[in-house]
Image: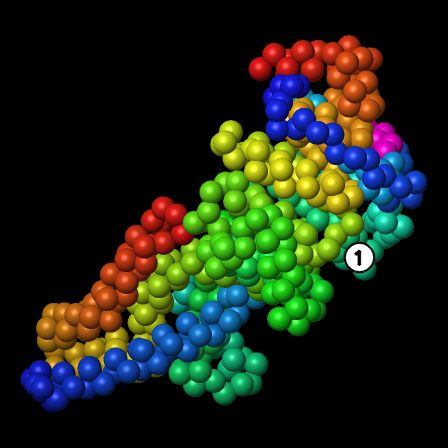
Amino acid sequence: MIRSFSINEFYFLLSAVQWTLALSAIAFLGGAIAGLLIALGRTSPIKPVRLAATGYIQVFQGTPLLMQLFLVFFGATVLGIDMNPWAAAALGLTLNASAFLGEIWRGCIQSVPRGQWEAASALGLRYPGLMRYVILPQAVKVALPPTVGYLVQLIKGTSLAAIIGFTELTRAGQIVNNATFQPFLVFSIVAALYFVLCWPLSLLAARLEARYAAPGR
Amino acid sequence: MTLNDDRTEAPVPRSMSDEIIIRMEGVQKWFGDFQALKDVNLEVRKGERIVVCGPSGSGKSTLIRCINQLEQHQQGRIVVNGIELGAGARHLDAVRREVGMVFQSFNLFPHLTVLQNCMLAPLKVRGMAKDEAKAIAMKYLQRVRIPEQADKFPGQLSGGQQQRVAIARALCMNPKIMLFDEPTSALDPEMVKEVLDTMISLAQDGMTMLCVTHEMGFAKSVADRVIFMDRGEIVEQNTPEEFFSNPRSERTKLFLSQILSH
Ligand SMILES: Nc1ncnc2c1ncn2[C@@H]1O[C@H](COP(=O)(O)OP(=O)(O)OP(=O)(O)O)[C@@H](O)[C@H]1O
Ligand SMILES: [Mg+2]
């Protein structure tokens, strides 16, 4: 039974956008929290911590995101945990995002000049205070543009969750296509919807970059 | 860099006591294979003003950075205000509370105002109340004569003003010892005087000071002792009068001839 593409199909795609956004938001939030820990680990004065964080980043950057989603999804089943595609996608993307954000933010932390660490240490600030009051506030400014830029990658990356059966925008596109057999039309619309989500963020990233790259403060 | 520099005419009265506040014994420091400090022995008395000079790479910065452990020495002993360094984090905290440091590149925190720069350590290290920290910060900003800049950001100040803020920031912790690592080297010539004047007034108040500097006028009028370093060693140390008029080692003579001919 083949339907033709109608306004209902369009609404179906449109409503799937919310799942793409929800998945992106969760992965971004979770990834940000874990990513901060990874970034701190990567810049830690304690060597084993540094090595562990480095290993984590290398594993997640060195394997395809899709494999990570498969491993979380099917791995949970092997361990006897009943993991639905939604939870698996959220967890897999969070882990992946934490590695990428961790690496981005490591660079931002290390871009704060050595003299700042030295001055704060000489004043008697210990590591937690030094990070919180001196280093991180300066790193945040540097981090903002690449972080927004990464968010664009993350939103596009959520499309892989379609493969483990989570119904976000891409999966909704597949479903509509299976019913209408109008792949070019359907996936054009899907792509356009991704573009509408990502383009403003790309613009924002570029603007932030121009602003913070400006000379002076 | 001349000897007869008008800004430093009046010698600062001596205010040294007999109490030894810094003691370095047989200190050795390596960076990888490179030995940056070779068997350094140094005793600094309370209230003493020491100028450290020497060619580039001779270990001057390393020497004073070992005193507050921005660099860790590998051998020998360093005792600061009765606290042995290298014996655990608690000791390190205690020493850093007693030792202030001023850097060549100011190293003010650019995201904080001048006032916040000065209040940070009293608040977060000493655990002071906000009012008290603010009062202290304002007191030392007065002292370096820029209280009116308190709400500006460091980037809005001249180099000389920034360095005076850096001095005030260190003083807010009420240190017993102040370390200066070429505090005027990054400044435009017209701003050197305001920073040196601030340092001179500190010296007049009896602060124990170790200054790495090539301002020989400052050394002459303020220092109780000039230390000359070369290749990681203390080659010679003497009163400024003797040091400049009667240098003993060939290396010192060569160094002085180079620096004074500029
Ligand atoms: N972190 C480091 N790693 C490796 N080598 C270092 C390090 N810091 C200093 N050195 C080396 O140790 C030696 C002494 O350095 P130091 O900074 O103490 O010299 P300095 O007398 O202060 O010189 P300058 O007048 O140029 O500031 C130099 O040869 C320098 O290259
Ligand atoms: Mg130096």
The x and y percentages for residue B193 are 57, 33
Q: Is residue A107 above or below residue A160?
A: above
Q: Nearer the viewer, residue A62 or A33?
A: A33
When asked about the image quadrant of residue B122, the answer is bottom right
Q: How many marks?
A: 1
Decide if residue A141 is in sight here.
yes
Decide if residue A128 is in sight here.
no
Is residue A38 toward the left or the right of residue A23 in the image?
right
Is residue A33 toward the left or the right of residue B19 in the image?
left
Which residue is at 86% across, 49% downward? B81
Q: Is residue A174 above or below residue B98?
A: below
On the image, numbered disc 1 is attached to which residue?
A: B94
Q: Which residues are magenta?
A: B37-42
The amino acid pointed to by label 1 is Ala
Ligand 1 within 8 Å of disc 1? The answer is no
When asked about the image quadrant of residue B245, the answer is top right
The quadrant of the rendering that contains the N terminus of chain A is bottom left
The x and y percentages for residue A71 are 48, 71
When asked about the image quadrant of residue B137, the answer is bottom right
Q: Is residue B233 above or below residue A204?
A: above
Is residue A12 toward the left or the right of residue A73 in the image?
left
Question: Would you say residue A166 sits in the magenta stretch?
Answer: no
The x and y percentages for residue B172 are 67, 56
Secondary structure character of the magenta stretch overall: strand
Density class for disc 1 (Cα within 10 Å; few <14, some 14-19, many ≥20) is some
The x and y percentages for residue B188 are 49, 32
Which residue is at 47% across, 42% downward? B158
Q: Secondary structure at mark 1?
A: helix
Which residue is at 63% across, 58% downward? B139
Chain containing the residue with disc 1: B
Which residue is at 57% across, 38% downward? B194
Q: Nearer the viewer, residue B134 or B89?
A: B134
